[in-house]
Image: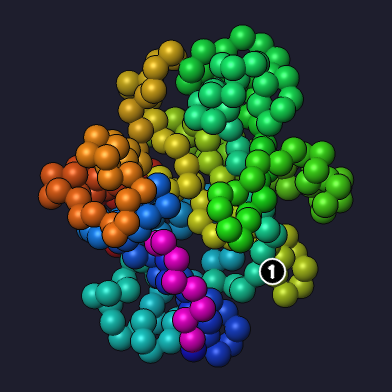
Amino acid sequence: MKKIISGKVREVYETDEGQLVMVTTDRISAFDVILNSTIPNKGKALNQIALYWFDLTKDIIPNHIVSAELSDMPNLFAYDKENYQGRTILTKKLKMLPYEFIVRGYMFGSMWAEYKENKTFCGKPVEGEYVQAQKLAEPIVTPSVKNNEGHDENITMDRLRAEIGTEEANRIADICVKIYNKCYEDAKKKGLIIADTKFEFGYDENGVLTLGDEVMTPDSSRFWAAEDYKTGVSPRSYDKQFVRDWLIENKLNGVTPAPELPAEIVEKTAALYKECYTKITGNAEYK
């Protein structure tokens, strides 16, 4: 077994059987900098929320999960529950597509910024009149290509079709919307609005299209509290906004070496992840 990735949040190991062990840490990043603080149990929240959605959507598309039980993993993980329980998964090793597929259900973020200027998004006209945070007539899929350096680049569906084929591009976009709609309806019953999210896909050893990475977590999605939602403003969200706001207020956004967060910001952020986890899974405590 060897470690092959040490990312902003995840440590990834390859097993002797050619599978992957992914450990979701409590690290937190903002403005492309890994901060010098951790958020207690953030990794458990992300991992267990993703497992909930993977299970809910497995009838739409297969996913990369093999097991979430430490007993099914190499001894390093199986014998160290304190460090790995609840935050570790065994997965298939996929041949990943070099794209992220963003599903947008609401006029917000970068889409709102461009729409305000010229009624377009990704260079294409947007039909209808919208205000900030308004629900779109239909969810839309906007792919981006993962660059080795710098930020991901938004691309058009036409470019995606040219690169991977019309049939495959349309199939993936259709799957993205189906996943989003199913999770959206489930979250809505629990007082959450999924404004947007992103998916990643790959092919397994048999060439089967498979959902990978993470799915519908506060780090990959924008969750809003339904009780506070209204158009024209930025709704209360379940993410690391406390962290971003503190960094901006103190002119530390993007600064290296990474700063430490005040205890109050750490506690508020941890509580927000926990609240989101409980709302989605129905569990009061992490497993």
Q: Look at the image and say whether residue 129 sits in the magenta stretch.
A: no
Rendered view: 18 above or below 165: below
Q: Residue at x 35, y 83 (%)?
A: 78
Q: Which stretch appears magenta? A: 2-9
Q: Residue at x 36, y 82 (%)?
A: 77
Q: Residue at x 39, y 30 (%)?
A: 224
Q: Look at the image and say whether residue 5 sits in the magenta stretch.
A: yes
Q: Is residue 46 left or right of residue 186?
A: left
Q: Dividing the image into 4 quarters, which one contains the C terminus? A: bottom left
Q: Position of residue 55 (x, y in %)?
A: 52, 55
For this rendering, which residue is in front, 65 or 119? 119
Q: Position of residue 117 (x, y in %)?
A: 59, 17
Q: Position of residue 247 (x, y in %)?
A: 27, 42
The colour mode here is: rainbow
Rendered view: 90 above or below 212: below
Q: Is residue 139 left or right of residue 192?
A: right
Residue that numbered label 1 is attached to: 95
For this rendering, which residue is in front, 225 or 5? 5
